[in-house]
Image (cartoon, helix red, strand yellow):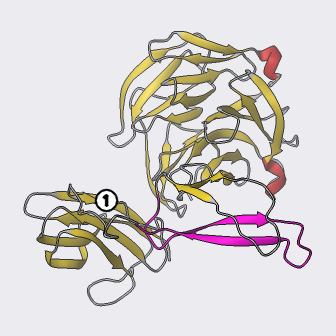
């Protein structure tokens, strides 16, 4: 998509993909459909290898004893962090607010923002000799983990994702050959990232496989995220014939917009029906069976996002008020007004079907929706994929 011949670094900030050129100082930005949005460079930064995202800013290394602290939105260098090893790969540890870094075959060290070493994974323990990307994972059961993308001897060798348990500082024994999934068998390992925000409840790991052509890959890592429910009791037992039992299910975490259904699977030794799925529906139970009025003005992220065909915008109003909901493209041009009237206090859902004021379908891309009243205004981004 970029026209560049060699990409070695990669990252995802929850909205855009980024890749780093090995032949220039350019950084490429793509939307989630893979279309190139822009190419830019950061004055004072050259030779980037891998990238890391802390939820606000981007960080990277250029195989030197420095972590660059960068603002990709404004395309400026904010500062730098001195390190005690060259930074060929980098991953942000959100629990420690620090960075796992290393050279191609060195110890992997946890550096804080002041340049101090907090922890070390010895090279004799991990045994990797050509590391090019790393990513932090605290979603997978038994973690947190550090994923490392290793080139081995280079082209023709398996390009492996390795999993290291950060509790033990030892490899788990799990490794996955990315090159086996692509026709470009001569591709070599590049940057790596993990993210949760691409789809509700799912966690992904992705990166770049450098070759001809370069391949950007994304795998589903785990369902992760806030679980929708937990089976409290009982989790096993015996139910006599012609009798019943009660299951207690606790609902918690972040839910998508209703209607939403989960299910409990009950397995038994019944030869005619060994497995039963019992649906669990989201609904509200109160003393008077009525939902309480919202206490604050709130606009939720549209769901689903990204979306195809239709999406729902949900807002909560503590009192009746005039509300205008407008869709804009990234050029600031109005696409459609969804609501322009007084709404009652309470919970509201507004649907957009991906059409403009004339009823014509708009193209795939990023759109903004603005929810405005006399006293409040909220703007969110959403992604339409046709």
The answer to whether one can see residue 132 in this image is yes
Image spot of residue 313 (x, y percent): 34, 69
Is 188 positioned to the left or the right of 78 in the image? right
Please state which of residues 82 and 293 is positioned toward the viewer in this rendering. 293
Depth check, front residue: 274 or 24: 274
**Quarter occupied by residue 368:** bottom left
Q: Dividing the picture into quarters, in which one does residue 64 lie?
A: top right
Task: Tell me if residue 257 is in the magenta stretch.
Answer: yes
Q: Position of residue 147 (x, y in %)?
A: 69, 35
Location of residue 73 with respect to 237 vertically, above or below: above
Residue 352 vs 367, above or below: the answer is: below
Of residues 256 and 30, the one drawn nearer to the viewer in this rendering = 256
**Vertical relation: 37 (above or below) 28:** below
Q: Which residue is mark 1?
A: 380
Quarter of the image with the N terminus in it:
bottom right
Q: Is any atom of residue 333 visible in this view? A: no
Determine the residue positioned at 82% across, 72% down.
241
Report the residue that reaches farthest toward the right. 271
Q: Which percent across, then down, holds residue 285?
A: 40, 66
Q: Examine the image and state in which quarter residue 298 appears.
A: bottom left
- Is 381 situated left or right of 131 in this image? left
Q: Where are the magenta residues, as a range? A: 255-284
Residue with the most extreme left position: 374
Residue 224 vertical position relative to residue 200 in the rendered view, above or below: above
Q: Magenta segment: does it hold 145?
A: no
How many labels, in total?
1
**Residue placed at 88% from the left, 40% from the top?**
157
Residue at x 89% of width, y 67% of height: 269
């Amino acid at each position: 998509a970029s026209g560049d011949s060699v990409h070695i670094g990669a990252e995802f900030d929850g909205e855009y993909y980024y890749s780093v050129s090995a032949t220039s100082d350019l950084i490429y930005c793509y939307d989630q459909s893979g279309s190139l949005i822009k190419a830019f460079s950061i004055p004072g930064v050259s030779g980037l290898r891998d990238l890391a995202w802390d939820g606000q800013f981007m960080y990277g290394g250029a195989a030197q004893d420095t972590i660059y602290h960068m603002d990709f939105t404004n395309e400026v260098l904010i500062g730098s962090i001195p390190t005690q090893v060259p930074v060929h790969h980098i991953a942000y540890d959100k629990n420690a607010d620090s960075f796992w870094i290393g050279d191609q075959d060195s110890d992997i060290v946890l550096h804080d923002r002041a340049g101090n070493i907090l922890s070390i994974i010895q090279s004799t323990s991990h045994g990797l000799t050509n590391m090019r990307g790393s990513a932090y994972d605290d979603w997978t059961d038994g973690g947190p983990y550090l994923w490392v993308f290793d080139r081995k001897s280079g082209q023709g060798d398996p390009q492996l994702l390795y999993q290291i348990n950060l509790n033990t500082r030892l490899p788990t024994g799990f490794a996955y050959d990315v090159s086996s999934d692509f026709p470009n068998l001569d591709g070599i390992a590049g940057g790596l990232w993990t993210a949760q925000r691409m789809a509700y409840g799912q966690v992904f790991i992705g990166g770049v496989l450098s070759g001809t052509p370069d391949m950007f890959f994304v795998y589903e890592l785990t369902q992760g995220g806030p679980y929708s429910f937990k089976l409290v009791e009982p989790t096993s037992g015996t139910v006599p014939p012609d009798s019943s039992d009660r299951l207690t299910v606790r609902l918690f975490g972040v839910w998508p917009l209703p209607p939403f259904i989960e299910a409990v699977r009950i397995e038994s030794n019944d030869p005619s029906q060994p497995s039963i799925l019992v649906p669990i529906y989201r609904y509200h139970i109160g003393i008077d069976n009525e939902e309480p009025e919202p206490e604050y003005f709130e606009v939720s992220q549209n769901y689903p996002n990204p979306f195809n065909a239709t999406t729902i915008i949900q807002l909560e109003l503590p009192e009746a008020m005039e509300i205008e909901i407008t869709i804009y493209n990234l050029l600031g041009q109005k696409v459609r007004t969804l609501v322009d009237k007084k709404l009652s206090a309470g919970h509201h859902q507004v649907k957009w079907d991906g059409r403009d004021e004339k009823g014509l379908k708009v193209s795939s891309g990023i759109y903004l929706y603005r929810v405005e009243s006399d006293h409040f205004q909220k703007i969110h981004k959403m992604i339409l994929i046709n």
